Amino acid sequence: MQTTPNKAARWPLIRQGIVFQLKLGLDALRDILMSPVSIVLVIIDVVMANNQQQSYFMKLMGLGKKSDHWINLFAVEPLDKDAKDNPQADDNNVDYWFSKIETVVKEQRVDGKLTKAGKEKIQQYFSRINQTSDTPES
């Protein structure tokens, strides 16, 4: 007879499942946005006779590659080894932000509710995420 694992032992799997679903949502949103944009950019490149270096479509492909790294959809570990060695690379990954938000929620949980300070901290993380994604990368 097989014993069922206790609730604490199941939490990592549940957490991974939730994070995976959120990442799938981000990935789907990116795909929905990039599909029509890519078609328009190909047409613009053809009309303007842009070469590979001038191509708006190729710039979009570069952005898509960066977003693949940021979403990190099929990661087993929350942060890769390089990100652990480079503190500035930490916030270039959605796993880092999920773990930060999870930490804040755990720290601020009181009777199943977040304190005002906890909510403000989460809002700060989201605004930092927005600032990070809005800044152009070279």
Image: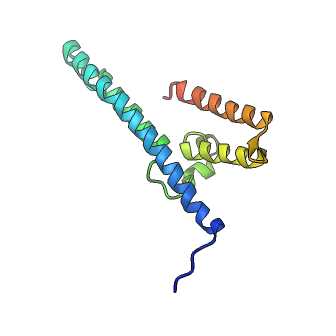
Task: Report which quarter residue 100 is drawn in.
Answer: top right
Q: Residue at x 71, y 45 (%)?
A: 105
Q: Is residue 53 visible?
A: no
Residue 122: x, y in percent?
Answer: 69, 36
Q: Nearer the viewer, residue 110 or 52?
A: 110
Point out the residue furthest to the bottom here. 1
Display coloring:
rainbow
With respect to residue 107, does 26 lie above or below? above
- Residue at (24% x, 19% y) in the render: 45
Q: Position of residue 110 (x, y in %)?
A: 80, 46
Quadrant assignment, res 28: top left
Is residue 99 shown above or below 50? below
Question: What is the x, y in percent for residue 60?
Answer: 36, 28
Vertical position of residue 12 compared to residue 46: above or below: below
Picture residue at 53% right of the left edge, 56% below the top: 16
- Count of picture labels: 0
- Using the rendered image of the protein, determine whether residue 15 is visible from the camera's viewpoint: yes
- Name the residue furthest top: 48
Q: Residue at x 77, y 44 (%)?
A: 108
Can you tell which quarter of the image residue 31 is in? top left
Residue 47 at x, y percent in the picture = 20, 13
